[in-house]
Amino acid sequence: MGARMTYDQGLWVLTAHPDTLLLSESAPEWLVEECRALGIVEAAGPGAWKLTAAGFAERKRLLQEPTS
């Protein structure tokens, strides 16, 4: 992915279950739409979202990024 995610987007991506990649369902609609536009989430059923392959790569990057 070319552009960096916002802080809010990154936090939601980090809520993904490590096996199912399902995300927390408590995200506001604006956040869902931003992440969907970036191609990092896709619908997984009514009101449910999961990471795409690109989203999984972003999650992995976030977990490996050193904190300063």
Image: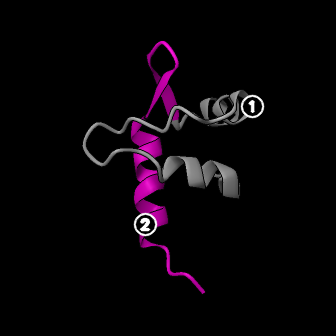
Extreme residue toward the bottom, this view: 68
Task: Judge whether 6 appears above or below 47 on screen.
Answer: below
Q: Is residue 49 visible?
A: yes
Extreme residue toward the top, this view: 46
The residue beneath circle 1 is 30
| Mark 2 touches mark 1? (CB < 8 Å) | no
Across and down, in percent, residue 62 comes to 49, 64
Across and down, in percent, residue 17 comes to 34, 44
Is residue 55 rendered to the left or right of residue 3?
left
Kindly identify the residue that appears in the image at 55 percent across and 81 percent down.
67
> Which range is magenta?
41-68
Q: Earlier in the sequence, mark 2 or mark 1?
A: 1
Q: Residues within 10 Å of mark 1 (few under 14, many from 20)?
A: few
Kindly identify the residue that appears in the image at 51 percent across and 48 percent down.
13
Quadrant of the rendering where the C terminus is positioned: bottom right
Across and down, in percent, residue 42 comes to 49, 25
Task: Judge whether 51 appears above or below 10 on screen.
Answer: above
Q: In the rendered structure, which amino acid carries the disc numbered 2?
A: Leu
The label on residue 13 is none
Rounded to the nearest whole Å, what is the CA distance between mark 2 and mark 1? 24 Å
User: Tag 2's secondary structure?
Assistant: helix
Across and down, in percent, residue 4 comes to 66, 56
User: Tag 1's secondary structure?
Assistant: helix
Kindly identify the residue that appears in the image at 48 percent across and 53 percent down.
14
Extreme residue toward the front, this view: 26
Q: Place residue 36 in its image quadrant.
A: top right
